[in-house]
Image (cartoon, rainbow, N blue to C red):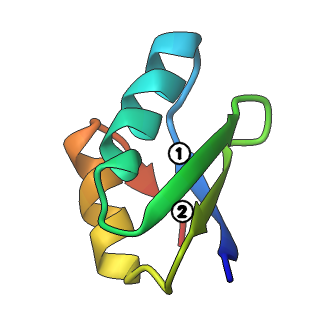
Amino acid sequence: MSETTDYTVNGMTCGHCAASVTEEITQISGVSDVSVHLETGKVTVTSTAPVALDDVRAAVAEAGYELAG
């Protein structure tokens, strides 16, 4: 069974931004898919188990961005 969670990431403006965020989040254990929508800043993460918010926040920070909220 998979879980899907949406996040909003501030500061992404181009394909390189989206690729960086995708690469970092994909490295989180259990993440099977990441979809980034630049226009809205929405990032959809699909995983095999719940992913800790702190792990997503750290991955986004590693890419040079921050989660909204």
Q: Using the image, determine if residue 50 lies above or below residue 66.
A: below
SS state under label 1: strand
Please give the residue where the numbered disc 1 appears in the rendered image. Answer: 10
Q: Residue at x 36, y 42 (%)?
A: 65
**CA neighbours of label 1 inside 10 A, class few (<14), some (14 to 19), many (20+):** some
Q: Position of residue 64 (x, y in %)?
A: 27, 36
Residue 1 occupies quadrant: bottom right
Q: What amino acid is at disc 2? A: Ala
Q: Earlier in the sequence, mark 2 or mark 1?
A: 1
CA–CA distance in space, label 2 to label 1: 6 Å
**Mark 2–mark 1 CB contact (< 8 Å):** yes
Q: Position of residue 25 (x, y in %)?
A: 39, 51
Q: Residue at x 46, y 13 (%)?
A: 16
Residue 28 shown left or right of residue 22 in the figure: left
Looking at this view, name the residue that lies furthest to the front. 1
Q: Position of residue 52 (x, y in %)?
A: 37, 83
SS state under label 2: loop
Please give the residue where the numbered disc 2 appears in the rendered image. Answer: 68
Residue 38 shown left or right of residue 10 in the figure: right
Q: Using the image, determine if residue 30 lies above or below residue 41.
A: below
Q: What amino acid is at disc 1? A: Asn
